[in-house]
Amino acid sequence: MTTEERHHEVIVLGAGVSGIYQIKKLVDLGIDAIVLEGDEDLGGTWYRNRYPGARFDSESYTYGYSFSKELLDEWHWSERFSPQPENLRYLNHVADKFDLRRHMRFDCRVETMTWNEAERQWRLDLTDGTSYTARFVITSLGPLSAPTLPRYEGMDEFQGLAFHTWAWPKEPVELAGKRVGVIGTGATGIQVIAEIADKVADLTVFQRRPNWSTPLNNSPISAEEMDQIRARYDEIFDNCSKSPGGFEHVPDRRGFWNLTAEERRAFWDELYAQPGFAILAGNFMEIFLDEEANREVSEYIADRIRQRVTDPVVAEKLIPKDHGFGGQRLPLETRYFEAYNRDNVHLVSLQDTPIERFTPTGIQTTAGHHDLDIIVYATGFDAITGAYDRIDIRGVGGQTLRDKWSDGPSTFYGVLTTGFPNLFMVAGPQSVSGSTNFPRAIEGGVDWVTGLLQHARDAGRTRVEAEADAEEEWVREVVKAHERMLFRRSKGWFTGYNSNVAGHQEGKIRYQAYFGGAPKYNAMANQVVADGYRGVALS
């Protein structure tokens, strides 16, 4: 490959949900662009997360792309919440339908990115020694693409199978007759545990902190229902655009205190039985803002858990005490709590009996030894900024992005960051993508980034950078929206807290996502465009 062949006007990093749509937009405009993907194929989250139970928790028909009526008309989602194999087939179908693979380069993991001020371009050095250059780089790295492992003594001594859910083996894992340990009960752990409880000989769940969780209420989508969905796609996407969370579920505006306690409970019974995030996104806004309202709904969900778990001692251990309902990312589940009613499923609370060390044959806690054949790390991700930290990105004057963001990200609408010209971020830190239905957010993000790129090209500008004052103003807006919410004190990835991430200061909030709602974010971002890209320096 010649030096000329390794130079492109735009390089997109990542061939997941956002990268696929981004390269489609660039190709349609006739821009010289390629995608560099570190994995051996496209799909991002849905290529990597092959663990049992992996599926959408957004309704399938709100997750798919909206940009092509032909695509909407021909694709049939088989389930209300589609499983990982179907999701990956969908993304491959999109790439093949629009002939996007020829613009993608796989097994291309970027190690360093260096800004050349004189040339006004980026140099990208890959782990295999190959280098590329580009006028503009668009990151589509995904908010949950940097997995984290726990740090326990002896982890390398365990002689059985051990892997993170993100790295679940491609070849089938034999679970029948096995003693399996799962560490972590976040969104991923809850899906795995519920799926494999009846397939293994023995399942030990090592719970670091319990999470609130509510029923997914999944169901098949018949051909008839799919036809009805197709007929109302315009309405569906319009509803999503008006919803703070990007779903069809919208907050109830009657006012929490305008109803009696009995009326509220009857309403919650209805929401609990509905699919998806209805109980969260269709609830009263007060549950996110008012301590007393949140306490009442939290007790309602706690009662639901108690009703579903036979052993009252186990039930209490599954109920969070350190945060209220909606105070962290809400996992959705299918018969998760019922799994603990099985004789072969055991809950180990690491708050009561911490792990001391791993051994060749299992895990030793302060209460005893657990013999295991397989250990699954459902221990989450270095969310939002983690994928950026794993690339050595050096901007103006050699400043590293990792250093700039060491105490938390600082961006302009989650798209630009001062000191790193011509670096555009889709679903970047402090955008709305970390707080809403992801594809609904990234379509708007890709459109905004592409519009800015077009604006610069049409004006003959070769350098695009956020103005420092404008970036500081946006960070203040992010902080203000965040501090209104009760989850400001939580230890979830909403606040950038993750005990697995080296270098993250425990107890220090990292303002990683915008929580003012998608409609407000989009209105403000569109006003920036209307004002001639106010806050963006083009030269």
Image (cartoon, helix red, strand yellow):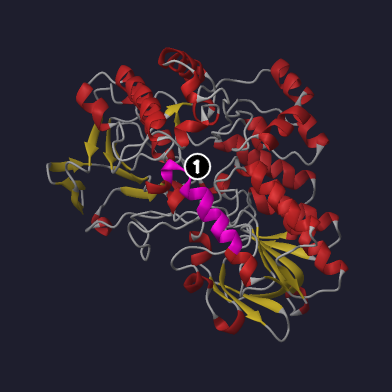
The residue positioned farthest toward the bottom in the image shown: 118
Q: Main secondary structure of the magenta part?
A: helix
Query: Up-down: is 531 above or below 84?
Result: below
Query: Up-down: is 425 above or below 49?
Result: below
Image coordinates for residue 522, horizontal then vertical, percent? 69, 47
The quarter of the rendered structure image containing the N terminus is bottom right
Image coordinates for residue 127, horizontal then vertical, percent? 54, 72
Q: Is residue 475 magenta?
A: yes
Identify the residue at horizontal 48%, vertical 60% (top origin). Answer: 386
Query: Up-down: is 50 above or below 18?
Result: above
- Magenta-drawn segment: 473-487
Residue 423 in view here: yes
Count up the numbered dots: 1
Image coordinates for residue 359, horizontal then vertical, percent? 19, 52
> What amino acid is found at the position of numbered circle 1 in the picture?
Arg
Identify the residue at horizontal 64%, vertical 37% (top origin). Answer: 63
Residue 52 in view here: no
Label 1 environment density (alpha carbons within 10 Å; few <14, some 14–19, many ≥20): many
Of 267 and 477, nearer the camera is: 477
Image coordinates for residue 5, horizontal then vertical, percent? 77, 74
Using residue 419 as the reference point, say whether residue 530 is left or right of it: right
Residue beneath disc 1: 50
The quarter of the rendered structure image containing the C terminus is bottom right
Of 140 and 211, nearer the camera is: 211
Q: Is residue 127 magenta?
A: no
Using residue 539 as the reference point, say whether residue 87 is left or right of it: left
Query: Up-down: is 380 above or below 338?
Result: below
